[in-house]
Amino acid sequence: MSQNKGVEILCIGSELLLGNILNSNAKWLAEQLSLLGLPHYLQTVVGDNHERLKNVLSDASKRSSILITTGGLGPTPDDITTETIASTFEAELIESSIIIQDIKSKFKDNFKLPKNNFKQAKIPKGAQIVPNPTGTAPGIIWKPKDDFTVITLPGVPSEMKLMWEKTIKYWLSKSFNSRKIINSKILNFSGISESKLVEMIPDILINKNPTVAPYASLGEVKLRITAQAKTIDETNYLIEPIEDKLKKLFNTNIFSNDNQTLASVVINLLRKRNESISVAESCTGGNLASAITAIPGSSDVFLGGIVAYNNQIKQNILGVPSALIKQYGAVSGPVAKSMALGIRKTFQTDWSISISGIAGPNGGTENKPIGRVEFFIKGEKYQESIQENFGSHRSRSDIQKLSVVRALDRLRLFLLK
């Protein structure tokens, strides 16, 4: 591979441009290229249009050594990847008997083979077939120019990943085995802003190998530590001192260094203590329970929850006194406390969390603006009342997400004690 050229990813499909489908293939492929140590400089998305696809292919052949495409290998008229690649580089399309036999074998037990599927058997003359173990769309590895290779893969993620693991990864490793490996580790932070975090580590951020880069998401910050070396062990050797320094500096602000979510960290901490939890939610509408139950095996810790969106439910199910709601309002510390006590008693759990707030876009007042959220965490020997003002400028979904993050993080910090 030329030192000035790298690998380019091209994802094909109008559904990607329209936002109907999330382009997870590009992310996954980029990670795999990093593991192989192959330089990857550009990603492109193009719709199912012959001329536009042809232009992108032509440009890619001038700036990259390898182009990996996903999508457009199906049997329908808008699947134009293979024929456009052949047209761009003025190659003859030939019908492969190997592909035809493979397609027939996948239809023989259940369905009559549609004629459209024979379109998938046509590949540029001289191209290497990349078998598709589960689908009917094979890929190719083809070198239309001396310094340029095209690799095509289907857009279905499960098919694409399997073909990569069985064929493409080994072909790339064998062809470019002198490249350095790029390895990354991500530290997840909560309870600290990106700007504050960056302000505290100026010396670390200027490192060249490994490099350290911050990425902010709602309620959390990530630091990605990336090292290059000839082996995975060597990259880990470079990463570990930086990771240790960050852990000493930020301590409990780091909630994970192995891609765990806040919810999974909390579940694991409760599991180690052999303790259970229940939740009572209002403004978050079940998002806290959803975050917890998204973790496999959480049922041994999480017993259940109630979305007490209506005040009558707060009173009748959770036992919140009507006088308390009348005096302080549904969004208040006393009501949040009563909700937490009620759900803990109802489910007989060691812990409970309640959330009540004003997520907007309406319902705010001068005393209780949009973004005001009340929390209460109750345990056998611990309780905490928390009030947050996330800001009226935030969207409803953002306030709900921030509320879930805040609730889980506060419980995590206590469980760490």
Image (cartoon, grey):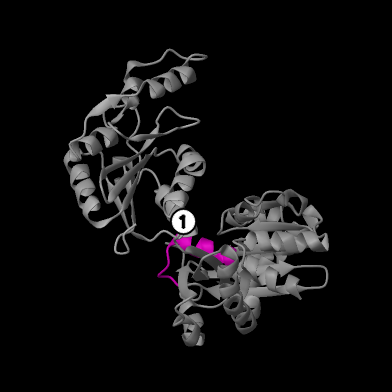
Q: Is residue 2 visible?
A: yes
- Percent position (x, y) of residue 107? 46, 17
Question: How many marks can you see?
Answer: 1
The amino acid type of the residue labelled 1 equals Asn
Question: Where is residue 184 drawn, in percent x and y?
Answer: 52, 66
Q: Is residue 38 above or below residue 412?
A: above
Relative to residue 409, is residue 41 depicted above or below?
A: above
Between 359 and 200, the residue placed more toward the observer is 200
Residue 321 in sight in this render: no
Q: Which residue is mark 1?
A: 177
Q: Is residue 325 magenta?
A: no
Question: Which residue is at 47% across, 43% downward?
Answer: 164
Q: Is residue 55 left or right of residue 14?
A: left
| 370 horizontally vs 297: left or right | left
Q: Secondary structure at mark 1?
A: loop
In magenta, the rendered stretch is 391-405
Q: Is residue 399 magenta?
A: yes
Image quadrant occupied by the C terminus: bottom right
Left or right of 307, for residue 20: left
Q: Name the chief secondary structure element in magenta.
A: helix
Residue 110 x/y as whole percent: 51, 15
What x and y, as percent, mark residue 309?
59, 54
